[in-house]
Amino acid sequence: MTVIAATAIAVSLFVAFQVADELLGSELRDNAENQLRADALFLATYAERPGPARIQLPPYPGSGRLVRVIGPDGSTRTPAGQPALPPASEQARRVAQGASADLMESKDGDEDGYHIYTRRTGDGAIQVARVADDSPVNQFGFGLLVIGLFCVAGGALVGRAVARTGLAPIDRLTAAAVRVARTRELDADIPDEGGGEIRRLVQAINDMLAALRDSRQAQRLLAEDAAHELKTPLTSLRLNIELLVRLDRRGTLDTALPAESRSRLLDDLGAQVAELSLLAAELTDLARGDVSDESTETLDLADVVVAAAAQARSRRPDLEVALDVTSVWVSGRPAALQRAALNLVDNAGKWSPADQPVEVRLRAEGTSAVLEVDDAGPGIDAADVPRVFDRFYRADSARALPGSGLGLSIVQRVVQAHGGRVTVARSGRGGALLRVVLPIPSARLTAAP
């Protein structure tokens, strides 16, 4: 910024000097020419009666104007002691011969330049000349140069001071960002100072740090919750395996555990492994957040819901799902939406009595696609409703049922990532009613009949 300020001032002064030099030079030339015309008119009036050939020319006073008389034959006379002028030009001789009334010329002599004015009078012409004096222009240019140098230096100093003052918040912001990167401490906000773009930049970075703090806190809580949830099944699995290994080493496996007990123990091990596999898969899905390689596309949500219901039936052959779906097109990730729908059906299947189906309804309401899944179970207690979508949260009545406590949390994350919302209420059959609302793309609304 210092260099830019100094360069801008220097360029401005150069342009101003060129313009002022041209104006001053033009003004001086006009004044000199006007003075020459006035002197020539006076001398022409003085020489009118005797004629140029007989006019008496007084000696040169040593300074001031220069005079020369040109006869009709081209001969010239000058006052005694006067410096020699450049030879009369052909145009000046024609004026003396009557070809034109006057002539203004600029000529270079042996040492100086001259402004020469020729005026016809009688049978000849009078020439008046002055030395072209460029000293005022040169003095003006030198003064302007000195002033310009001071202005450039002053502008550079002022520009440096302004730049340092204006960029001080950026320096402090950079130092704070380096400190955060070095210490990995995200708790301290960067002071909100400066104005305009700098203030918005500081606020944006503070918002980014707040988001990073929230993300780190969420990761820490997820790790703590996962460790807590994994502790019980891992402990049970380890104890059962240790029991089998100890009895096998003693050679008393067949006698200490009857076939029925051994079969029940193996079933428990299989169930625990399946529960751990499900928990690991859901933890992985939840930890990924919104990061996914799956691309977004326009799809029929009815196909997704039907596929999720079929997958739920394949997991639990005794589960009955009653579908009432209509074609509704949305924009989203097919696998993520199918996972959310599957979790909703699985959750409802845990609560529905064997003789009551899980009802799944899909329809369009205005600019939204509405998916409802309800069961005929006992419903969700009012105290549990605020926490039903929390990770690992399981109501007291659900602790004996299989599951990880992550299903509805994954549903909420997927729905929010697609710009929708999910709510829970009591269904008309007394059970839980989970309602998902997703936006329909405006292009589909325009194309709808």
Image (tube, helix red, strand yellow):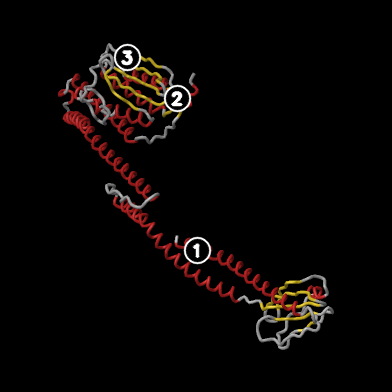
Quarter of image, res 251 = top left
Quarter of image, res 343 = top left
**Nearer mark to the viewer, of 1 and 3:** 1
| 84 lies above or below 100 | below
Q: Position of residue 14 (x, y in %)?
A: 55, 66
Q: Position of residue 98 (x, y in %)?
A: 82, 72
Residue position for label 1: 9
Quarter of image, res 77 = bottom right
Please tell me which residue is depicted at 25% across the width and 16% down the height of the picture. Answer: 377
Mark 1–mark 2 contact, CB under 8 Å?
A: no
In this view, which residue lies farthest toward the left?
A: 256
Between marks 1 and 2, how big is the CA–CA gap?
63 Å
Please tell me which residue is depicted at 18% across the width and 25% down the height of the picture. Answer: 253
Residue position for label 3: 320
Secondary element type, mark 2: strand
Between marks 1 and 3, how big is the CA–CA gap?
84 Å
**Nearer mark to the viewer, of 1 and 2:** 1
Q: Amino acid at mark 2?
A: Leu
Q: Earlier in the sequence, mark 2 or mark 3?
A: 2
Q: Amino acid at mark 3?
A: Glu
Tally of numbered discs: 3
Residue position for label 2: 299
Q: Nearer the viewer, residue 294 or 90?
A: 90
Q: Is residue 394 left or right of residue 49?
A: left
Quadrant containing the N terminus is bottom left
